[in-house]
Image (cartoon, rainbow, N blue to C red):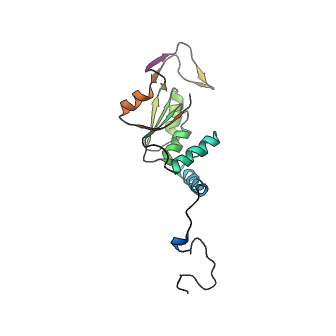
Amino acid sequence: KSTSGRRAGEAISARNMPARGRRKPTIEKQLMEARRKLASSGCGKPRLETIFNFVVHGLFLEHRMPEGDVLDVGASDGTWACMYACMQPKRTVRAMDPSTEMLRRLNQSCRQPNVRSYLGAVSNMSGFVQNTNRFYIGTLNVSKGGNVPLFTIDRLFEQWRSTLGFAHLDL
C-alpha cells in the first residue's frame, strides 16, 4: 500500500479520492438526490407543471426561499403539499382547499407531521361564499349548497401567528 491509502495501480475513484480532491456535487446531482429521497420517503414528485417543479426544487435546494411557512391554496389531494413537507421538514406546510372530499384525500395520502389542512379559499376579504348552486372544480363537488370560508392571506398568517415563506396558489 502507498502512503495515499491506495494499492499500487489502483484507479482513483470518488470512494478512494482524498476528501480535499473531491468536487462539490452539481445542482443536477443535488436534484437527483432530492428526487431519490422524495421517492424513498413516500412523497412523490408531482407529474404536472414540470418546469415550475424544477424551479421550485432548485430554489428549495439552494436555500433561496424566505423563512416561514409554505401555503398551498387549492391543495386538492395534497400532492404538492406533501412534496413541500418532505423537502422542507422544518417548515409548516399549510394546505387549503374548498372541498371536504379533497381534504379527506389529502389527510389520507400525506402523513407528514408538518402538514396542516384547512377548509376554505383565499380572497381579497374574509367571510363566506354563499353557495346557493353547487359549483364544481373538474368533477369534484366543492360544497353541497353550504358555505365556503374565505380568508385573506394576511389574516390567515396573523391568526396562525406565523410568517409566509412561499405560496403555491391554484385559484
Residue 94: % across, % down: 45, 36
Q: Is residue 47 visible?
A: no
Quarter residue 125 falls in: top left
Residue nearest the observer in this picture, 166 or 83:
166
Residue 133: % across, % down: 56, 14
State left or right for residue 47 relative to residue 160.
Answer: right
Residue 159 drawn above or below residue 60 = above
Q: Quadrant of the N terminus?
A: bottom right
Residue 127 drawn above or below residue 80 = above
Residue 100: % across, % down: 50, 28
Q: How many marks?
A: 0
Residue 69 drawn above or below residue 42 = above
Magenta residue check for 156: no
Quarter residue 55 falls in: top right
Residue nearest the observer in this picture, 94 or 77:
94
Q: Residue furthest top?
A: 132
Quarter residue 25 falls in: bottom right
Residue positioned 64% across, 42% down in the render: 51
Q: Is residue 152 visible?
A: yes
Residue nearest the observer in this picture, 13 or 121:
13
Give the residues drawn in magenta, as a range: 124-131
Magenta residue check for 125: yes
Residue positioned 40% across, 37% down in the render: 163
Q: Quadrant of the C terminus?
A: top right
Residue 88: % across, % down: 47, 47
